[in-house]
Amino acid sequence: MILALLASAQATMVAKALDPFALAILSDATAFGDVTEVETRWEGGMIWTVATLSLVDLDEEAEVWIPGGCMSGLCLTVAGTPWVDEGERVFVFLRDEQPTSLAQGLFHVEGDVAVRDTEGLAVREGAKPQAAYEMSEIRRAEATVPRRRGG
């Protein structure tokens, strides 16, 4: 049984704010691209929002799986998850195809600035995560991400 709740305002407690270098250490991949499609899927007994990215640096696509979404009148809201819109450019730190540390790991790219949504995050240790970074700083952190075996 799934309990689906819709709430207008939710806060998610995170243990610690993570900068791009910490996200890189916790991630097994990154993706930098344009969102070409956003769809909702039912898999593993859960509703997922799946964003397909056309990667900027490669002639490939990647999928980003975000917990939650609406399907057939049933909505699952998972506090602390990021959002994506078709047509936007994003940079995402990934662990098992999901944004690392949920909203902390997905950045909306606007020109040379990467911005993440920290509105609903409440941090237990220290200050709230920094919301905006220069893309050059994000890309420097990307180099520290260990690549998947065989990938």
Image (tube, rainbow, N blue to C red):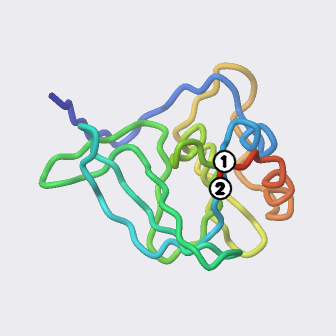
Query: What is the total number of numbered labels drawn onto the structure image?
Result: 2
**Position in image of residue 53 (x %, y %):** 52, 69
Which residue type carries mark 1? Arg
Query: Where is residue 130, by image quadrant?
Result: top right
Q: Which mark is residue 148?
A: 1
111 over 119 or under it: above or below: below
**Position in image of residue 66 (x %, y %):** 43, 49
**Position in image of residue 127 (x %, y %):** 74, 30
Q: Is disc 2 in contact with disc 1, using a CB cutoff of under 8 Å?
A: yes
Q: Residue at x 49, y 77 (%)?
A: 87
Q: Nearer the viewer, residue 31 or 3?
A: 31
* Quadrant into which the C terminus falls: bottom right
**Residue on which the image places disc 2:** 151
The crowding category of the residue bearing disc 1, from other C-alpha atoms within 10 Å (few below 14, some 14 to 19, many at least 20), is few
Query: Where is residue 89, by image quadrant?
Result: bottom right
Q: Residue at x 64, y 26 (%)?
A: 123
Disc 2 from disc 1: Cα separation = 5 Å
Asked which secondary structure carries label 2, the reply is loop
Which residue type carries mark 2? Gly
**Position in image of residue 114 (x %, y %):** 71, 61
Q: Residue at x 59, y 37 (%)?
A: 101
